[in-house]
Amino acid sequence: MAESNDRDPMGSADASDDGWAVQSLFHFIVNASNFERSLAFYRALGFKLLRDNRDVIWPSMVAENFGMPVAQGRGALLAIGEGETHTRIDLIEWLEPKWEDPARSLPPERYVPRVMALRTRNVRAAYRELKAKGIEFIGEPRERDPSIGLESVVCCRDPDGLVVELIEYMPGVLGSRIESLARRE
């Protein structure tokens, strides 16, 4: 196999040359204005509670790592999927400093959304069950679209406006097929 940096815009060396490599996404932080409300939402989506940190006082190194003068919050590590590389979110209600989403002052249709896409088996059944539990959706599940390999997709918002996309591809399709889509010139 020929070596190439075509996919590496930073021009860095192959990670294996120095004995290190990123293994997977461990977690990403989802901000919450009300921890209990957001925890209930993500549990309804099927996330499991791995670690409950809501009463933990964070050491000063947390603030230092994030480049903040102080950092305290209520949190929980949640996971969906199986195995050690399952998808995890760190749900945090920031206590100090208080998190204020600047987009909250705009109507949802006026700001560029933050989006979390969850690959989902049987989107239509998920929609029916979650809607029955009181989760509000942005629209109805989309119809099947073989041209892009999509079985269905539907979106809802978490309690703080994060768009959660439930997406189902046809068997054997990794992500949306783009070959037949128009291109910008």
Image (spheres, helix red, strand yellow):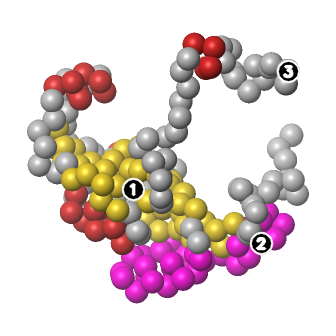
Q: Nearer the viewer, residue 126 or 154?
A: 126
Left or right: residue 14 compared with residue 22 = right
Is 107 above or below relative to 59?
below
Q: To which quarter of the image does residue 130 belong?
A: bottom left
Q: How many marks?
A: 3
Q: Which residue is mark 1?
A: 79
Q: Which residue is mark 3?
A: 2
Residue depicted at 27% across the width and 48% down the height: 92
Q: Nearer the viewer, mark 3 or mark 2?
A: 3
Is 98 above or below relative to 165?
above
Q: Amino acid at mark 2?
A: Asp
Q: Nearer the viewer, mark 2 or mark 1?
A: 1
Left or right: residue 58 compared with residue 169 = left
Left or right: residue 86 compared with residue 94 = right
Earlier-in-chain disc, 2 versus 1 = 1
Q: Which residue is mark 2?
A: 145
Q: Amino acid at mark 3?
A: Ala
x%, y% of residue 63?
A: 23, 27
Q: Is residue 109 visible?
A: no
How packed mark 2 is, by other alpha carbons closer than 10 Å (few <14, some 14-19, many 20 or more), is few
Classify mark 1: helix, strand or loop.
strand
Q: Amino acid at mark 1?
A: Ala
Q: Which residues are magenta?
A: 122-151
x%, y% of residue 18?
A: 57, 13
